[in-house]
Image (cartoon, rainbow, N blue to C red):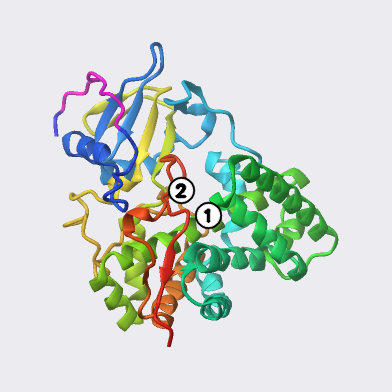
Amino acid sequence: MSNTYYRDEPIVAPSFDRAPSCPFDPPPEVTAVRAEQPIARLATPAGAPGVWLVTGHALIRQILADPRFSSRYETQYHPLLGDRMPPAPVGDLTGMDAPEHTRFRRLLAGKFTVRRMNLLTERVTEITRERLDAMERQGPPADLVEVFAQPVPALMICELLGVPYEERVRFQDQTRVLADAGSPEEQYAAFVQLGDYLRELALAKRARPTDDLLSDLATGGDLSDEELGGVAAFLLGAGLDTTANMIALGTFALLRDPAQFAALRDDPGLADGAVEELLRYLSIATTGMRGVLADVELGDRRLQAGDTVILAVNAANRDPAKFPDPDTLDLRRQAGGHLAFGHGIHQCLGQQLARVELRVALPALLTRFPSLRLAVPPDEVPLRADPTQIYGVLSLPVTWDRG
């Protein structure tokens, strides 16, 4: 590595769009940048602070563990919007630094332990079986997103937050619209309605707590009413969209790779490793951002306070310096160390629940429907177009042979 630190000439920002012919791979322009320089300064509007694209696995891991890189949105310059970002909504842990982040994290960390999440395996198994039964009764063809991938995590969120049983159909309908099933206007309306509902539910838990996470927070913490409602909304967003898209996109990837599909179908014991590899391979949370709080040396670059770094997690999880033959899906790979759940103090709180849901749902789907296959040509599967959002499919038409 060079000992000469410099702010070299910026490059034109690469496209963050994935190639339609390779829907599971990182954007080709981003991986091309990684091959040349794992940290590169981007051209931004005149007078803007430095904006850097970081694509190397080791560098992103270093940033995520360094408190000189801030998670607060207002410290970050958005190169597309051309201005600083607004502060995070109340209760949004992803937009906080210590000590505020520490306060919220401590309240939640004990609710998401590996042991506690593993205890939920039985309920995840029951919900998975119920959804597969419904899918079988409906018969082929079916949209896997609608009948399986979205309902499983939605129902688990209902369990965790203590959504009353009689409210769950309406709750699922709103979450389905929110997860790209409606127009932008319908999605915004669903977002507002869900936010209002969760705030009302959180306040109701203060008066009449039940056996659920939201009641624990309402009665056992020092959260204000606004903070409690904000945390509930944060948990919904963090635990629903990501897992639903991992189930659907993971199934799509397996259907495109018959050997890996057969490996997991015939040996459900592969589930633990298969989930880690799919998390690495797909990297549905594609990017992140951090604001630079103090001058810092990163790789062979010198960053200044006020700069912004864009973290291309999908490129880092395909970094050949970390993972041999990284563009191959190999369910027997030792994929530990991937950054799909982040790293450092902001590592995903709900990662253990997501793992439980994926370890149960994917093998169960393949075992129940061993002849599962796409019902349309692969290039007709609609993908999410916005590269800044959680990546996934809008629908996944599948079919299978009736038993």
Secondary structure of the residue carrying numbered label 1: helix
Q: Amino acid at mark 2?
A: Ile
Q: Position of residue 284 (x, y in %)?
A: 40, 52
Judged by its main secondary structure, the magenta piece is loop
Q: Position of residue 250 (x, y in %)?
A: 38, 63
Q: Which residues are magenta?
A: 3-14
Q: Position of residue 168 (x, y in %)?
A: 70, 65
Residue 241: give its label: 1
Say which label, 2 or 1, has the lower sequence index. Answer: 1
Secondary structure of the residue carrying numbered label 2: loop
- Which is more toward the observer, 144 or 365? 144
Tell me, yes or no, whether the two marked residues, 2 and 1, touch with CB atoms within 8 Å: yes
The verdict on residue 123 being magenta is no
Q: Is residue 332 left or right of residue 66?
A: left
Q: Is residue 224 left or right of residue 47?
A: right
- Which residue is located at x 67 percent, y 48 percent? 190
- Which is more toward the observer, 76 or 156? 156
Q: Amino acid at mark 1?
A: Asp
Residue sitting at the far right: 207
- Which residue is located at x 16 percent, y 27 percent? 3
Q: Position of residue 360 (x, y in %)?
A: 46, 75
Crowd tier of the residue under label 1, counting other residues whose Cα lies within 10 Å: few below 14, some 14–19, many 20 or above:
many
